[in-house]
Image: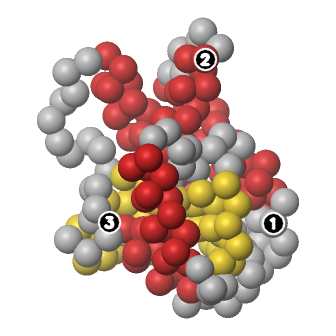
Amino acid sequence: MANLILVTGGARSGKSDYALKRAEAISGTHYFLATCPVVDSEMDDRIARHKADRQGGIWRTIEEEINLETTIQTLGPDAVCLVDCLTLWVNNLMFAAEKLGTVFGEDEMSDRVLNLLRAAENFRGTLICVSNEVGMGVVPDNVLARRYRDLVGRSNRIIAAAADEVILVSCGLPLFIKNET
């Protein structure tokens, strides 16, 4: 199984920067698995900044919004795969279900995360997943936002239980909350 690391924290907490530096300290072929869809010009600018941060370096970017499991299965042994981020993956799964006229709920979320973990079992490298901690704030005022918060929380809990390490980044500082390596 992959060495599985979950890096979580609030928005703009420094979790992606921490995950990048952590991944770059590991030898192997480096893959950046980007889940962010381009939905407006501001998001396009964010994506461009993230790509510029990795430009000319060791990273091979793979843009995949939905099928993380399949993508991870294609990576060779001893690779380092940074998934940034699971929070947007949940968003993308919800949006895809909505386009099909279905509801993406907790059971579906659990199934997708378990599929992701099965892919990690077959991956012989390091898998670092970045995800926002969205459950520490105000309870959202609408059903869709509450479902989103719950699904991200469910995803984070399942992955954290399986992870070798879990790091919470707050104010740019890593707080090590699980370390089984």
Can I make out residue 133 in this image?
A: yes
Say which of 93 and 52 sits in front. Answer: 52
Q: CA distance from mark 3 to mark 1?
A: 27 Å
Amino acid marked by disc 2 = Lys
Closer to the camera in the image, 113 or 51:
51
Mark 2 residue element: helix
Q: Which residue reaches farthest front?
A: 41
Name which quarter of the figure residue 111 lies in: top right
The answer to whether marks 3 and 1 mark residues whose Cβ atoms lie closer than 8 Å is no
Circle nearer the N terminus (3, 1) = 1
Query: In the image, which disc is placed on residue 99?
Result: 2
Residue 38 location (% of width, % of height): 54, 44
Q: Residue at x 15, y 35 (%)?
A: 138
| Quarter in which the N terminus is drawn | bottom right
From this viewpoint, is residue 121 visible? no
Within the image, what quadrant is residue 131 found in? bottom left
What residue lies at 49% left-to-right and 82% top-to-bottom?
Answer: 22
Task: Sort mark 1 into few (<14), some (14-19) or many (20+) by Cα contacts within 10 Å.
Answer: some
Give the labeled residue for mark 3: 168
Q: What secondary structure is marked by label 3? A: strand
Seen in the picture, residue 66 relative to 125 is either above or below; the reply is above
Tell me whether circle 2 and circle 3 mark residues in contact (CB < 8 Å): no
Instruction: Name the amino acid, label 3.
Output: Leu
- Drawn side of residue 174 relative to residue 80, left or right: left
Which residue type carries mark 1? Answer: Leu
Rendering coords of residue 83 (x, y %): 58, 60
> In the image, is residue 118 above or below residue 103?
below
